[in-house]
Image (cartoon, rainbow, N blue to C red):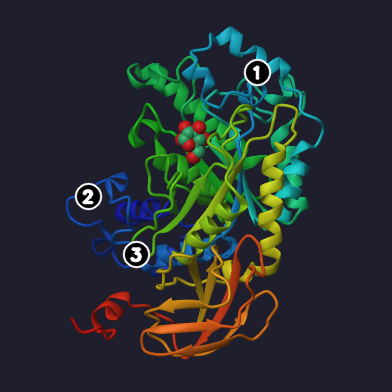
Amino acid sequence: MINSKMSRRAWLKGAGASLVSAAALRAQTAPATQTAPPEGQTSTHLLDPQQNVGEPAAIAANRAQRMQWWHAAKFGMFIHWGLYSVHGRHEWAMEDEAIPIDEYMQFAKQFKPKPNAPRDFARLAKRAGQKYMVMTTKHHEGFCNWDTKLTNYCATKQGPGRDLVREYVEAVRGEGLRVGFYYSLMDWHHPDGARCATDEAARRRFVDYTHGLIRELMTNYGKIDVLWYDVAWPLDAAGWESEKMNEMVFQLQPEIIVNNRNHLQGDFSTPEQHITAEKGDRAWESCMTLNDSWGYQRADDSWKSPKTVVRNLIQCARDGGNYLLNIGPRGDGSIPEESVRVLEEVGGWMSRNGDTIYKSDLCQPRRSNYASFTRTGNTLFMHVHFWPGGDLELGGLMTKATSARMYASNQKLEFKQDPYQLKLSNLPQQPPDHPVTTIAIECEAEPTQDNIFVRKEKPRDGV
Ligand code: GLC
């Protein structure tokens, strides 16, 4: 498809422009000498994972087009569901408790979720304001949630007796959401899963198996929107044949986006359990648990509050990232009640305030001890999580404000502004919205904040 070695490399480095646009890419890509990676970087996976270094414009444009829906989506649901959901002691129990394999395999018989359980996941995601879902097709335990021809250790041939991935895909599409597949490269069940690192024949078998499973997932379920690789232990990109892997994925799913956990950059980075923006234009998605476990852990009562979740979502949106928030359903397919409660409350807030998240641009203002911010154009959204009551102040806003209102109720607010402070007054004593109240401040230009200016210039007292 791609005729010169260099442009093929650049193409793969971009984690795959679609084959549909490969011709366009050929036409648009500058001669090979100009598309070569920076000097000293001979392999795509050695490029700086933080940035899309030296990326040709056509690849960046193709990625931007594929990722448009994802950037607008902002909020997704992660689902960890497998045999560990039966055990109920975290998805790493098989390793962390060193459970003997025949003991662990009993869970495959006991895994009997109620029919169409994924519909409940998808409906909850919809109510929460989440626009896409990413479910484990195979986690580290090696059990395949779909109807695979490559192993008997799969949903159709074990306890569930049916294809859970198909149910999931249909449920997600039924709610009008985008479909993502999580796939763990690391495999604790397959006999070659560890020895592939030291035995070439084992590596060959295991890589063929892995590519074969991914091929099934990319072939049998229609259009898939996200492929979310995880843990590439114990091989490197060459060992996994990751470039070939992505090439196959993009051949089968030209519009898909892929993450960066098969040792290639992919389309986006995946900060885990923290919110850290990427540099430059690089896309990122912060994935997080609702308590402290991904898979169902019956004793984990460390639930995040709806306020924490909303604040996290605001922080991601402020810095241009997505937020992928996890649920860990039980083996019977039921969703822990706390997850439902938290997500529904977040969904209520999103139904009143969602556009301040979905339509947000990068936002520079960030300093307040009771609010955080997002921005759309010249409008600054001040999201107040600790309501001070009566009046409310913002220091260092460098842009002239022209009006202020409660976002959800549209109620106009009185304000005064001097070079250092914007002061809103005559506010209710109690927070008008829960868990966070959003105030929209219209500005003359893109709002910026400079607190050092305040520190240096605000008039001081004499000694
Ligand atoms: C880690 C964990 C895994 C979880 C994943 C989600 O890689 O090993 O259990 O699925 O994070 O990002």
Which residue is labeled 1 in the image? 152
User: What is the total number of numbered labels drawn onto the structure image?
Assistant: 3
Q: Is residue 150 left or right of residue 167?
A: left
Residue depicted at 62% across the width and 30% down the height: 296
Q: Is residue 211 left or right of residue 264?
A: right
- Above or below residue 340? Residue 380 is below
Residue depicted at 30% across the width and 54% down the height: 6
Type of the residue with mark 2: Gln
Type of the residue with mark 3: Gly
Say which label, 2 or 1, has the lower sequence index.
Answer: 2
- Above or below residue 151? Residue 320 is below
Labels 1 and 3 touching (C-beta < 8 A): no
The Cα–Cα distance between marks 1 and 3, rounded to whole angstroms, is 45 Å
Q: Residues within 10 Å of mark 3 (few under 14, many from 20)?
A: few
Camera sees residue 266 = yes
Type of the residue with mark 1: Asn
Residue in front for this viewpoint, 299 or 152: 299
Residue in front for this viewpoint, 129 or 18: 129
Say which label, 1 or 3, has the lower sequence index.
Answer: 1
The Cα–Cα distance between marks 3 and 2, rounded to whole angstroms, is 20 Å
Residue in front for this viewpoint, 267 or 341: 341
Residue depicted at 70% across the width and 77% down the height: 409
Q: Residues within 10 Å of mark 1 (few under 14, many from 20)?
A: few
| Residue at the extreme right of the image, as rendered | 115
Query: Circle 2 sits in a helix, a strand or a loop, which is it?
Result: loop
- Give the percent coordinates (x, y) of residue 433: 66, 67
Which residue is labeled 3 in the image? 280
Which residue is labeled 2 in the image? 41
Query: Circle 3 sits in a helix, a strand or a loop, which is it?
Result: loop
Query: Circle 1 sits in a helix, a strand or a loop, which is it?
Result: loop
Give the quadrant of the C terminus.
bottom left
Camera sees residue 21 = no
